Amino acid sequence: MLQLKYEKKYNIEKSELTPKGMYAAIETLMDFIPLFLLITIVLLSDMVSGEYSPNTIKALITKPISRKKIIISKFIVSIALSTGTIIISAIIFIVEAGIHLGFSDCRLPFDVGAKYVLDKSLPLTSVTSQMKYVSGSRSIIPLWTAVISLILIAIVISAAIVSVILFISTICRNSLISSIASFTLIGGATIWYMLGFMGRYLVSAKYGTFVKFLPIPYMIDNMGTLNGDISIQLTSSINVFFAFMVCLGWICITTFLSIYSFEKKDFD
């Protein structure tokens, strides 16, 4: 019924209801996320620790600039790099898919904002969740709007990931150790979430309350974050705003710790 109202309101033709270039671009972008995490770790894991090996850190801190500004500037540059990577990749995916499949699906209805509540009367098994859909909570937006929203979500979440990498790089004095630590923590958490958590509702019922405060689930399940279905996976009522607050929390905490750690370091 909701989709019929959407089609009538925007006078959607049947030809526009067939997934084509825009939808293919979304799927490609979602598949790109794990690779993006890998690229981010490779490029940024030594953003601070890399200054120790050639010992350029001493020359850096002797300049008339506070250590706090050094960390903040590195964070901003890293965010710009990750954001640019996401945007450029998205544009490439969209253009390539559009050239081959067309953009006639740009107004294809896309479900967002579904709300779920925990209903313990529902059976909990390895393949069924106790999260119950709240009737009427879902809304519909055009696919092109969903694409922009997914890109913005990815940018915000990537900022949280970058802040964690920055902190690891700040406390490590060796680039190799920093890279290994970043791969172990972020890569390990990603692999665990994808292989040991996603689709396992018994596990999510037990650990979802904790996992929902990590940025990894929202990066891996970007689409679920937008349409609300990630609530089923995490056995908690989750929306985009909550995901943003989680990421903002990680950014603030890890950036503060990075600044504090860098200011207290002895470089003699």
Image (cartoon, rainbow, N blue to C red):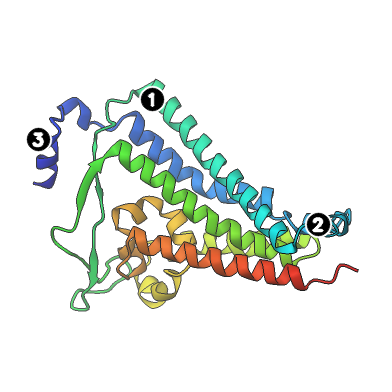
Describe residue 15's horizontal placement relative to residue 38 as left or right. left
Q: Residue at x 79, y 54 (%)?
A: 50
Q: Residues within 10 Å of mark 3 (few under 14, many from 20)?
A: few
Location of mark 3 (residue): 8
Q: Which mark is residue 64?
A: 2
> How far, Cα to Cα, is label 2 from label 1?
50 Å
Q: Position of residue 212 (x, y in %)?
A: 42, 69
Which numbered disc flags the more N-terminal residue, 2 or 1?
A: 2
Location of mark 1 (residue): 98
Q: Residue at x 84, y 71 (%)?
A: 266
Could you say whether the residue bearing mark 2 is in a helix, strand or loop?
A: loop
Could you say whether the residue bearing mark 3 is in a helix, strand or loop?
A: helix
Circles 2, 1 touching at the beta carbon (< 8 Å): no
The mark closer to the camera, 1 or 3, is 3
> How far, Cα to Cα, is label 1 from label 3?
25 Å
Q: Position of residue 177 (x, y in %)?
A: 76, 63
Q: Is residue 195 visible?
A: no
Describe residue 31's horizontal placement relative to residue 77 as left or right. left
Q: Residue at x 46, y 44 (%)?
A: 31
Q: Position of residue 61 (x, y in %)?
A: 82, 60
Q: Nearer the viewer, residue 99 or 162?
A: 162
Which numbered disc flags the more N-terminal residue, 1 or 3?
A: 3
Query: For residue 55, which quarter of the picture?
Result: bottom right
Q: Position of residue 165 (x, y in %)?
A: 64, 60
Instruction: Tell me which amino acid carries mark 2.
Output: Pro
